[in-house]
Amino acid sequence: MLSKENLQEVYPLTPMQEGLFYHALYEPDSLAYLQQITYCLRGALDVGAFETAWNQLIQRHDVLRTVFIHRKRAGICSIAGSGPDAHRISG
């Protein structure tokens, strides 16, 4: 969970992110910018190995630890967490 203790960096939005955010506020039910993909896995899944690999990937790439926070008075910013539990998944 993201907290003040594991806050790594606060970034302003890029112009592209600002535009996407504007459209999300203007038309919240629109699917115009929604991209989703699903996979079907066959065979046995080693959940522990998957969890370990995914958490290592999250620690390696800031973008996977980024959340977007919007407050009416302060605008919006993206925040990257740090530390082993910033965005940890568990089965």
Image (tube, helix red, strand yellow):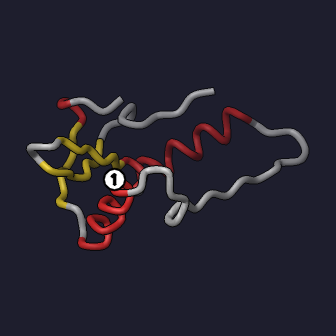
18 w.r.t. 42: above or below = below
Residue extending furthest toward the left: 73
* SS class, disc 1: helix
Residue 81 in the figure: left or right of residue 90: left
Label 1, residues with CA under 10 Å away: few <14, some 14-19, many ≥20 = few
What residue do we see at 23% from left, 62% from top? 13
Tell me where residue 7 appears, x and y as whole percent: 21, 39
Residue 83 falls in which quadrant of the image? top left
What residue do we see at 72% from left, 53% from top? 38
Tell me where residue 42 appears, x and y as whole percent: 89, 47
What residue do we see at 39% from left, 31% from top? 85
Residue 14 falls in which quadrant of the image? bottom left
Residue 56 in the figure: left or right of residue 78: right
Quarter placement of the N terminus: top left
Q: 89 and 78: which one is in front?
A: 78
Q: 31 and 17: which one is in front?
A: 31
Residue for badge 1? 25
What residue do we see at 21% from left, 52% from top? 77
Q: Amino acid at mark 1?
A: Leu
Quarter placement of the C terminus: top right
